[in-house]
Image (cartoon, grey):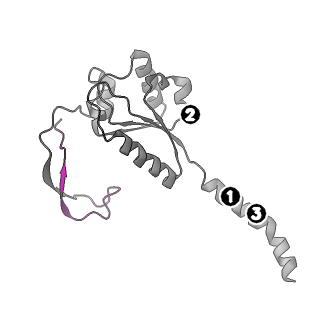
Amino acid sequence: MFNKLLKSMLPALGLLIAVAGFAQGKQFKALLFTKTNGFHHESINEGVDAIRKLGERHFFDVSWQEDPGQFNDRNLEQYAVIIFLNTTGDILNDEQQAAFERFIKSGKGFVGIHSASDTEYDWEWYTKLVGHMFHIHPAIQTARLKVLDRKFPGLEYMPDTQLWTDEWYEF
């Protein structure tokens, strides 16, 4: 009786395993871009490693590139998001900028990390995308951070206030 029950359950178990495997598959692909044409942060490789680990943990692929030639419609269509990690200076030509604009206007995503706001100063569209451009930063210093909205993603478990030493940008 048990063998008969087990045999009848095998197809369902196989389907369940297949569906679970599919659910654990890669959800999307991210272009991680680290081109610099100005200050080059020594922490770029550590940032790349951290984002790759996030990809492994949260099931997305990460393609690390420094070649601005990657910014064309055909290549960008494979990505759901472009991440600028510590980019600096003028890094894309007019054609590459146009491809990036079309990518964003198609509904795909952008994440700018750290000096992404120290990139492409003469490109008005990019400035609007980023919000503001980096102006200066004083010496590394400690500041008191206060959580104002616990519902903001990532702040749920932060203390009400904490001291944080960092490089604070002025915009």
Judge the density around disc 1: few (<14), some (14-19), many (≥20) Cα neighbours within 10 Å: few
Judge the density around disc 3: few (<14), some (14-19), many (≥20) Cα neighbours within 10 Å: few
Between 39 and 132, the one nearer to me in the picture? 39
Is residue 58 left or right of 89 when viewed as pictured?
right
Q: What amino acid is found at the position of numbered circle 3 in the picture?
A: Gly
Q: Position of residue 83 (x, y in %)?
A: 41, 37
Q: Earlier in the sequence, mark 2 or mark 1?
A: 1
Q: CA distance from mark 3 to mark 2?
A: 30 Å
Is residue 64 left or right of 163 when viewed as pictured?
right
Res 14 label: 3
Instruction: Give the quadrant of residue 3.
Output: bottom right
Instruction: Give the quadrant of residue 28.
Output: top right
Q: Is residue 134 above or below residue 68?
A: below
Check contact, mark 1 vs mark 3: CB within 8 A.
no
Q: Residue at x 61, y 55 (%)?
A: 23
Judge the density around disc 2: few (<14), some (14-19), many (≥20) Cα neighbours within 10 Å: few
Check contact, mark 3 vs mark 2: CB within 8 A.
no
Residue under label 2: 78
Which secondary structure class fits the magenta region best? Answer: loop
Quadrant housing the C terminus: top left
Q: Is residue 85 magenta?
A: no
Q: Which residues are magenta?
A: 150-169
Q: CA distance from mark 1 to mark 3?
A: 9 Å
Between 113 and 37, the one nearer to me in the picture? 37
Q: What amino acid is found at the position of numbered circle 1 in the picture?
A: Val
Q: Position of residue 7 (x, y in %)?
A: 85, 72
Q: Count numbered badges in the picture.
A: 3
Residue under label 1: 19
